[in-house]
Amino acid sequence: MRILVVEDEQKVANALREGLEGERYDVVVERTGESAFFRLNTETFDLILLDLTLPGRDGLEILTTLRGKRVKTPVLVLTARDTLQDRVAGLDSGADDYLVKPFAFAELLARIRALLRRGRASESPRLVVGDLTMDLITRKVQRGGQAVELTVREFELLEYLMRYEGQVVSRETLARDVWRETARTTPLDNVIDVHIARLRRKVDVERPVRLIHTVRGVGFMLREGEP
Ligand code: CA
């Protein structure tokens, strides 16, 4: 499980990283809203820990923008501002949970586990993006009601893109999560591109709406309409 920690205070950020890595989470720390956005444009995460008070764009702005882009990653807001209004504003902007600083690390872990569990429990055995549907049990894929025949790898690739609908998925991420290779290599990049091209032929060709988009210099994105 990958967690993005957005926190400007070095000490707090280090403590979070250490504690979470001790629990075997993969942790990436960003110290400003801008760098967090940049990171989210190229990588996918299972959860975001977001401090509200950041230099530049504050946490609430980040949250609003993320949800505006239809990024569904669970967000756990951390804040020192313990007022009811802030809580309400934070939750209204699309936070999934809220924790007031200072907090006990055990409490943070419990909230993180709950959010990650909730994410899995609400997971439908069917993924839907526009008129594209994927049944994870029967492994049948349809676009506009017509069957799409995929190889095992194409299915895994499409499943990944559908799970992260609206998010940019880099070749590096695909190499790690779909091909399960830790080192990114040029031959593997080519293999990924070939698979994307095949998927496009099967999913997008002769359709009025394209779903698989190339984000130049970064990777790919599945969504209805241009990214
Ligand atoms: Ca802060």
Image: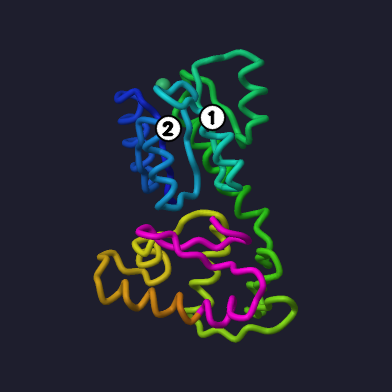
Residue 184: horizontal and vertical position, in percent?
A: 27, 66
Residue situated in front as seen by the camera: 67 or 108:
67
Instruction: Give me the residue at 50% from left, 21% from top.
Output: 79
* Label drawn at residue 95: none
Residue situated in front as seen by the camera: 120 or 185:
185
Residue situated in front as seen by the camera: 59 or 14:
59
Q: Where is residue 209, by image quadrant? A: bottom right
Under mark 2, the amino acid is Gly
- Residue 111 lies left or right of residue 146; in this view the side is left
| Residue 203, magenta (yes or no) | yes
Q: Residue tagged by mark 1?
A: 61
Do the numbered discs 2 and 1 sit on residues whose CB atoms are within 8 Å? Answer: yes
- Residue 6 lies left or right of residue 162; in this view the side is left
Q: What's the CA distance linking mark 2 and mark 1?
A: 9 Å
* Label drawn at residue 33: 2
Residue 82: horizontal and vertical position, in percent?
A: 57, 14
Residue extending farthest to the right is 145
Region in magenta: 199-227
